[in-house]
Image (spheres, rainbow, N blue to C red):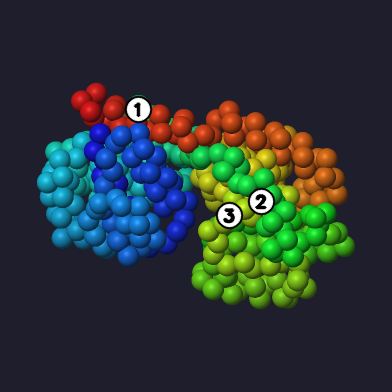
Amino acid sequence: MKILTILRSMKSGGAERHALQLMRGLRTRGHECLYAGPMAGWLGQQLRADGFDGINLPLLGLYDLPSLVRLALYARRQRVDLLHGHLTRGAWYTGLAARLAGLPNVATAHSDNAGKHFGRADRIIAVSGAVADFLERQGYDPARIRMVHHGIADIAARLPADARQTTRHGLGLADDEPCLLMAARIVPAKGHDTALAALATLKARRWTLLVAGDHRADLGPQTQALALDLGLVGRVRFLGLREDVPALLAASDVLLAPSRREALSLTLLEASACALPIVATRVGGIGEVVEEGASGFLVPPDDPAALAAALAPLLADPALRQRCGARARQRFEAGFTENAMFDKTVATYQEACGGRA
């Protein structure tokens, strides 16, 4: 099949990483993938470096008529079989351009607040059961919705045997020091403030928190100031935007994800693949990844006391961390591999095409 992916974004986030992974994986399976969107953005730059073809479109707002016309003409000229849009704006332009070009289209809803602008999709991919339920509550026909969990490559298998030791040494961490990791954009939805408030009550315990994310953008400066106000300087280390998250996971003992809103985090899957216990909030699709009391612990959002109570036994008990991590790895192998995601995505494409492709 020849697939045109549409996603309007300038930054690196879960949806962008997912689209990149999907295009790379489909190409290895013999499909041809093209991209439409801002080439100056993170995804556009990554795809160019990987040798993907595409068209540079700003897709400004929801009524960028020149971008829409160019998108439809490009799809016809390239003789694509299907258009695939991601996020609300991508779904909106994909649906309109597909109608203009007379082509089928699929749209992926990456969050449980993505209720608008998916009406023209022949099939809607929901990245979690929580997102699928949300779409149904918004009035979308369940017959058009397909739940396809994110899947990832087995990143643990690709790491060198000494990844944990080498990374911890590079970070100056002692071998027996409990290390917590937050790997996410520093934005309100990710709950960094909740994490710091919880850890401020655990100062008597031994731990270090690594924060991987651009601390110069979004809420980064405010979060650093909060760590200072709470007396956590030296305990919380802001690493900046990192491309070596798998190595950081290998070096860590617990993944912390106190999100206020989350569809299905790729970082949770990466942590599971690395056999890392997870302490997260019971929101969106997180409960589809984390098995309460087995692979980790789930707490309400915006509840520092509950978060601290869930963290405390993991900080104190290496054997508990090991048991939870082993169960997390089992759950990854059972339901969140990238091959399963590729198979289900292609099947959805074929449905949208009416079996023609």
Between marks 3 and 2 in the image, the one whose residue lies nearer the viewer: 2
Q: Which one is earlier in the sequence, the residue at label 3 or at label 2?
A: 2
Task: Give the vertical position of 295 relative to 255 (above or below).
Answer: above
Kindly state the secondary structure of the residue where label 3 is placed.
helix
Residue 338 in view of the camera: yes
Residue topped by disc 2: 163
Residue type at the position of mark 2 = Ala
The answer to whether residue 170 is left or right of residue 7 is: right
Q: CA distance from mark 1 to mark 2?
A: 37 Å
- Rendering coords of residue 260 (x, y %): 58, 53
How far apart marks 1 and 3 lie (CA) works out to 31 Å
Q: Quadrant of the N terminus?
A: top left
The residue tagged 3 is 245
The residue positioned 67% from the left and 45% from the top of the image is 161
At numbered mark 1, what does the secondary structure look like: helix, strand or loop? helix
> Of 79 and 279, which appears nearest the observer?
79
Seen in the image, is 69 located left or right of residue 253? Answer: left
Which amino acid type corresponds to the residue marked 3 in the rendered image?
A: Val
Local crowd size for mark 1, using a 10 Å CA cut-off: few (<14), some (14–19), many (≥20): some
Q: Nearer the viewer, mark 1 or mark 3?
A: 3
N-terminal label among 1 and 3: 3
**Residue 345, image x, y percentages:** 38, 33
In this view, 171 is above or below 233? above
Residue for badge 1: 347
At horizontal 63% and vertical 47% (from top left) the residue drawn is 160
User: Label 1 is placed on what type of residue?
Assistant: Ala
Q: Quadrant of the C terminus?
A: top left
Above or below residue 199? Residue 82 is: above
Q: Is residue 301 visible?
A: no
Find the residue positioned furthest to the right: 204
- Image coordinates for residue 348, horizontal then vertical, percent: 34, 30
